Image (spheres, rainbow, N blue to C red):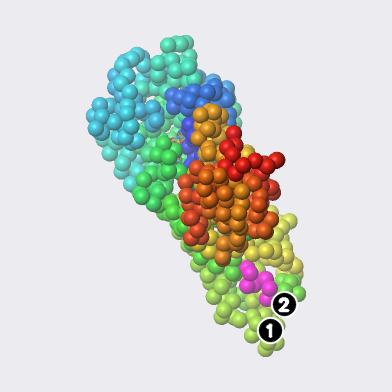
């Protein structure tokens, strides 16, 4: 029989809003594990996707005046785009609205009903639509949902139930006997506590919701979104459709999810379904903690406090003058390095920049950007053969050995700490061996050894870094002159780098960022991003960009448009903002008053070019202080990428302050 596939899953995400950092956290972690396993030669199947049924999705579509299908098509596309931008390389993106999946759900439902594991009864209790959860009276907190705190709906209706209670003791025993099944320990204990309260049969249908999957042979009911969603893992594994594939893929090796959906759904309902079907349970369910905001709240769509990782990466790239792909990797790095995977952690944009400066620009960037010029100067950029024993290669090999244990336990943070110990050692090695002194003293064998050792170390590091930062690893390999060699685990054994290679160093990988520029950038020229309008405001912040992403999914009403106070304004004065290359401070006459506005167009327009121009401005934007200057309003420009191409002006003279509609 062929090798068992290493099967990794993320939860499938609800499509009631666009993706954010919380989703990215679980998905990037799954991607790093998938890449690591691929690198170790495993046949990997990495599954992610979108959960497209349920009342809240139907509601979100209706609010936007769209059919559910139109709506889910757009949002699932937004998830795919985000994964692409964050270098998430999945093998299958499942959508629960796919006919193949819907057919499987109906088949499984029918089979369990036939077996007597699903039967008709009456549900009387509460339902939280935002969480799509059935709740008992005793579970409510002050009459509201215990998880999201929102209002719940009373339900009393005929419904089908899964006999979860019948499997409770067996599930409990399985968790006790297999300590590696539910991780981390806190989630395992929580699950045992949940089971000990007594598992009740799970309601698995709703009263004929239009957008959900119909119960086979009973049109009065549709299948509950969680029952439908959990089965995505079986659809993708090939259950009941491709026996050979299913035999290779199932059971899943690692199922990742946020801690809120582990005890009730993945560690009880899901095993009950699998046991009833006579299928083995997944090998590991691992719950990541929550990303919290600075104030300690869970980052979530419904709380409206989410940050878009792609916007952040683009902002970092723009301020640093760096590469957007490498900065997307910097965001991946932050997520996996900053927070212990099973625990909650606070997300702070400034902390991303701190890590960027300290770990990426300083440690990793320096190791390469110090080595390369020396190698050019003393060896004409061709890596010599080591003529004496080396030491860094062995350090890389040792770190590679340690990674196995760390990755088996999803200890991303510790894995990266170990890799960074090697990087720091490399920098310390340059200081200690001082190649410039070796060159001066004419000790060529020692000099050659140092250069080989450094390049071999960096080469090995590309393999170690690949799971976490694939674009960075690829860039470094190109600069090390080995772009044509596919990354391989063998690269980090020490001594694998081919001597005689000519290096091809490029621009700094991670140009340093001044924190002041970062703070100011929240309000400067347009972050480019796919699908966003070409003519955009000159000032923009993350919230604005997010709203633009949402604009993909809905039209605005005339009433909403009317909220904008657009006017013709004449630029009276223009000057550079001291210490900020991109900013101009303008005095603009908007009819009834003169306003100061800060615009990020200094690289494209000289101050004198603007004086006397009649521009279209947004007059009712809330003030923002940028580099110490209070900006009251914003000029508009057409942009391409990071560059303002043309200012939005009027095509003939008109009085200052004329409204623009
Ligand atoms: N559709 C269900 C899951 C069905 S799986 C068979 C669902 N979807 S969700 O869109 O609400 O996404 C939940 C998952 O997103 C969490 O379990 C977690 O993996 C991730 N996260 C969303 N917000 C998060 C944080 N603030 N922090 C960490 N992870 C978060 O539940």
The numbered disc on residue 68 is none
Q: Earlier in the sequence, mark 1 or mark 2?
A: 2
At 64% from the left and 46% from the top, the residue drawn is 614
Residue interval drawn in magenta: 368-374
Quarter of the image where one finds residue 268: top left
Query: Residue 196 sits in which quadrant?
Result: top left
Q: Position of residue 553 (x, y in %)?
A: 55, 31
Q: Is mark 1 within 8 Å of ligand 1?
A: no
Packing grade of label 1 (10 A; few <14, some 14-19, many >=20) is: some
Residue at left 59%, top 80%? 433
Q: Vertical placement of 521 versus 533: above or below? A: below
> Looking at the figure, which quarter contains the C terminus?
top right
For residue 547, above or below residue 215: below
Q: Are marks 1 and 2 in contact (CB under 8 Å)?
A: yes
Residue at x 30% of width, y 39% of height = 192
Q: Residue 656's spot in the image, x, y percent?
A: 60, 44
Q: In the image shown, does 236 or 334 lie closer to the viewer?
A: 334
Quadrant observed for ligand 1 in the rendered image: top left
Q: Report x, y in % for residue 314.
A: 58, 51
Q: Which residue is mark 2?
A: 377
Label 2 beta carbon less than 8 Å to ligand 1: no
Q: Report the Cα–Cα distance between label 1 and label 2.
A: 10 Å
Q: Does 449 sit above or below residue 83?
A: below
280 in the magenta segment: no
Residue named by callout 1: 439
From the image, give the main secondary structure of the stretch colored magenta. helix
Residue 35 or 555: which is nearer the viewer?
555
Q: Secondary structure at mark 1?
A: helix
Q: Is residue 371 rendered magenta in the image?
A: yes
């Amino acid at each position: 029989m062929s090798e068992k596939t290493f099967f990794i899953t993320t939860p499938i995400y609800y499509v009631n809003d666009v993706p954010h950092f919380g989703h990215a956290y679980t998905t990037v972690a799954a991607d790093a594990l998938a890449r690591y396993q691929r690198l170790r030669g495993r046949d990997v199947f990495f599954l992610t996707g979108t959960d497209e049924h349920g009342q809240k999705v139907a509601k979100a579509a209706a609010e936007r005046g769209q059919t559910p299908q139109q709506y889910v098509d757009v949002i699932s596309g937004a998830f795919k785009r985000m994964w692409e931008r964050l270098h998430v390389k999945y093998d299958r993106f499942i959508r629960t609205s796919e006919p193949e999946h819907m057919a499987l759900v109906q088949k499984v439902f029918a089979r369990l009903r036939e077996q007597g594991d699903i039967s008709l009864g009456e549900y009387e209790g509460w339902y939280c639509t935002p969480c799509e959860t059935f709740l008992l009276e005793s579970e409510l907190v002050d009459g509201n949902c215990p998880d999201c705190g929102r209002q719940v709906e009373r339900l009393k209706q005929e419904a089908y139930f899964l006999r979860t209670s019948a499997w409770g003791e067996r599930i409990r025993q399985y968790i006790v006997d297999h300590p590696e099944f539910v991780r981390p320990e806190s989630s395992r204990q929580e699950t045992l506590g949940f089971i000990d309260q007594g598992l009740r049969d799970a309601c698995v249908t709703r009263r004929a919701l239009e957008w959900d999957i119909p119960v086979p042979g009973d049109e009065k009911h549709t299948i509950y979104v969680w029952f439908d969603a959990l089965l995505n893992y079986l659809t993708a594994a090939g259950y009941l459709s491709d026996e050979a594939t299913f035999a290779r893929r199932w059971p899943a090796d690692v199922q990742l999810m946020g801690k809120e959906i582990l005890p009730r759904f993945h560690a009880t309902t899901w095993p009950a379904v699998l046991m009833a079907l006579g299928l083995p349970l997944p090998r590991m369910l691992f719950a990541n903690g929550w990303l919290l905001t600075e104030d300690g709240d869970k980052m979530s769509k419904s709380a409206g406090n989410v940050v878009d990782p792609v916007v952040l990466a683009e902002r970092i790239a723009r301020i640093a003058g760096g590469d957007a792909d490498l900065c997307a990797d910097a965001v991946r790095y932050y997520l996996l390095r900053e927070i212990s995977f099973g625990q909650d952690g606070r997300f702070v944009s400034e902390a991303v920049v701190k890590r960027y400066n300290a770990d990426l620009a300083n440690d990793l960037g320096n190791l390469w950007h110090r080595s390369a010029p020396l190698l050019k100067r003393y060896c004409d950029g061709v890596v010599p053969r080591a003529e004496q024993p080396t030491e860094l290669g062995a350090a890389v090999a040792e770190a590679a050995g340690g990674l196995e244990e760390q990755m088996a336990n999803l200890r991303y943070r510790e894995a990266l700490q170990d890799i960074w110990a090697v990087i720091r050692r490399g920098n310390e090695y340059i200081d200690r061996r001082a190649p410039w002194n070796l060159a001066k003293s004419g000790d060529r064998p020692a000099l050659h050894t140092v250069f080989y050792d450094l390049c071999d170390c960096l080469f090995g590091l590309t393999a170690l870094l690949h799971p976490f930062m694939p674009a960075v690893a690829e860039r470094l390999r190109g600069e090390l002159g080995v772009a044509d060699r596919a990354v391989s685990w063998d690269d980090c054994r020490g001594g694998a780098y081919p001597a005689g290679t000519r290096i091809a160093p490029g621009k700094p990988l991670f140009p340093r960022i001044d924190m002041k520029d970062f703070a100011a950038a929240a309000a400067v020229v347009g972050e480019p991003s796919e699908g966003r309008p070409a003519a955009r405001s000159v000032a923009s912040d993350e919230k604005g960009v997010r709203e633009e992403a949402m604009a993909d999914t809905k039209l605005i009403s005339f009433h909403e448009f009317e909220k904008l106070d657009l006017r013709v304004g004449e630029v009276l004065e223009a000057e550079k903002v001291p210490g900020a290359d991109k900013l101009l401070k303008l005095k603009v006459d908007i009819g009834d008053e003169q306003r100061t506005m800060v615009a990020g167009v200094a690289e494209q327009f000289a101050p004198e070019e603007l004086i006397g121009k009649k521009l279209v401005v947004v007059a009712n934007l809330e003030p923002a202080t940028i580099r110490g200057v209070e900006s009251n309003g914003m000029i508009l420009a057409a942009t391409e990428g990071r560059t303002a191409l043309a200012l939005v002006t009027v095509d003939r003279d008109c009085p200052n302050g004329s409204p623009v509609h």
